[in-house]
Amino acid sequence: MTMIIPPLCRAGRALVGLSQTQLADLAGVSLQTVAWFEIGKRNPVYATRRALEDALAVSGVAFVPEDGGGPGVRLRDSLSPVAEARKVIRGKRKKMRSA
């Protein structure tokens, strides 16, 4: 795994449709930690950055290492059971809103 940087955190979160609050909950950190990290206001300790990266990975984000074009994120080929469950729940919420 690469060590997460603010742009990858924002991009990964957007890719899987997580809010900052949801990412903070999944990673076990405060909302303020996520928000400040994403804007570059703070540089969290290794364990916090690892927790953010792990939470995004469990949610379906794959981190692409720098290969001359810079690091990036993409969707994993297969989602974890947690990510699959989250996808099902989102679908049910959308159906309930439209009903």
Image: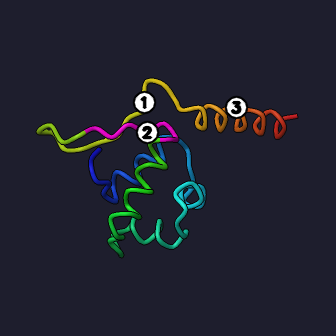
Label 1 crowd (10 A; few <14 / some 14-19 / many >=20): some
Tell me the distance, in whole angstroms, between the alpha carbons under discs 2 and 3. 17 Å
Q: Viewed as shown, does residue 26 lie left or right of 34? A: right
Residue at x 60% of width, y 32% of height? 81
Given residues 44 and 20, the one toward you in this image is 44
1 lies above or below 40:
above
Q: Earlier in the sequence, mark 1 or mark 2?
A: 2
- Queried whether the magenta region covers residue 63, the answer comes back as yes
Q: Earlier in the sequence, mark 2 or mark 3?
A: 2
Where residue 44 sits: x, y (%)? 36, 70
Q: In terms of secondary structure, where does tag 1 sit?
A: loop
Q: Viewed as shown, does residue 12 lie left or right of 87? A: left
Where residue 23 sits: x, y (%)? 54, 55
Question: Which numbered disc covers residue 88?
Answer: 3
Question: Which numbered disc covers residue 61?
Answer: 2
Tell me the distance, in whole angstroms, between the alpha carbons under discs 1 and 2. 6 Å
Question: Which numbered disc covers residue 22?
Answer: none
- Queried whether the magenta region covers residue 92, the answer comes back as no
**To which residue does mark 1 refer?**
76
Residue at x 66% of width, y 34% of height? 85
Residue at x 44% of width, y 42% of height? 57
Residue at x 55% of width, y 44% of height? 17
Q: Earlier in the sequence, mark 3 or mark 1?
A: 1
Q: Amino acid at mark 3?
A: Val
Q: Quadrant of the N terminus?
A: top left
Looking at the rendering, the stretch of residues picked out in magenta corresponds to: 58-64
51 lies above or below 34:
above
Q: Amino acid at mark 2?
A: Val
Question: Looking at this rendering, what residue extends furthest in the top direction?
Answer: 77
Q: Are marks 3 and 1 in contact (CB under 8 Å)?
A: no
Tell me the distance, in whole angstroms, between the alpha carbons under discs 3 and 1. 17 Å
Q: Are marks 1 and 2 in contact (CB under 8 Å)?
A: yes
